[in-house]
Amino acid sequence: MQLFVIRHAVAEEAASGEDDANRQLTDEGEKKLKKVVRGMRALDMSFARILTSPWARAMRTAELLKPICDKAPIATDLLTQPPRSELLAQIAELGEDVAVVGHEPWLGQLVAWLAFGDTRHGEAIVFQKAGVVWMEGSVIPHGMVVRAVLPPKFLREVG
């Protein structure tokens, strides 16, 4: 299985007292993400399904990935918390080429768990907004290898 772990694009700053789940992407964040998507297409990346956090900025990021995956994103609250076995099962059920869209620090923890078998090393992955980590293997702890960490600037330049 190929798994593409994608951090949401640049979002509005959190306002005092505002629900973090409602933060939207900025106009600049959307513009840059569209260039990232062009870069991903230039590298022949595509997904059969996208699993996303239901938070507004992640949902919009997943929607903007439509040129790479024509199926509607599937939202799950499992991407709004530290990763656990239910998330791995949901990813595995989706089949081969899958993308997940979410937030830090949980995405870094997910990558660390899948690659190293331990979520405590999540900070070892530098996950920029609209960045992508490409993984391959089995969706079990220590069952995947990291094929590439793709910063958004690189993907924008490729596209």
Image (spheres, rainbow, N blue to C red):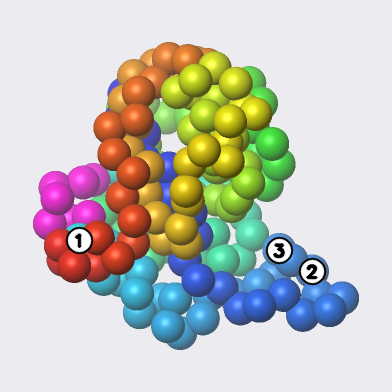
Q: Residue 7: say if magenta.
A: no
At horizontal 54% and vertical 17% (from top left) the residue drawn is 117
**Is any atom of residue 87 visible in this view?**
no
Check the image and name the residue furthest to the front.
124
At horizontal 69% and vertical 36% (from top left) the residue drawn is 82
Q: Is residue 129 left or right of residue 119?
A: left
Classed neighbour count for the residue bearing mark 3: other residues with Cα under 10 Å, few (<14), some (14–19), many (≥20): some
Q: Are circles 2 and 3 on residues that touch, CB within 8 Å? A: yes
Check the image and name the residue furthest to the bottom.
27
Image quarter where the N terminus lies is top left
Label 2 element class: loop
Q: Amino acid at mark 1?
A: Gly
Q: Position of residue 84 (x, y in %)?
A: 66, 26
Nearer-N-terminus badge (2/1): 2
Q: State the CA–CA distance, disc 2 to disc 3.
A: 5 Å
- Image position of 28 with respect to 130: above or below: below
Q: Which mark is residue 39?
A: 1
Q: Position of residue 5 (x, y in %)?
A: 43, 42
Q: Residue 43: say if magenta.
A: yes
Q: Amino acid at mark 2?
A: Asp
Q: Which mark is residue 19?
A: 2
Classed neighbour count for the residue bearing mark 2: other residues with Cα under 10 Å, few (<14), some (14–19), many (≥20): few
- Image position of 38 with respect to 121: above or below: below
At horizontal 22% and vertical 55% (from top left) the residue drawn is 40
Q: Which mark is residue 21?
A: 3
Label 3 element class: helix
Classed neighbour count for the residue bearing mark 1: other residues with Cα under 10 Å, few (<14), some (14–19), many (≥20): many
Which residues, given as a range, are shown in magenta?
Answer: 40-46
- Image position of 5 with respect to 39: above or below: above
Q: Position of residue 56 (x, y in %)?
A: 61, 66
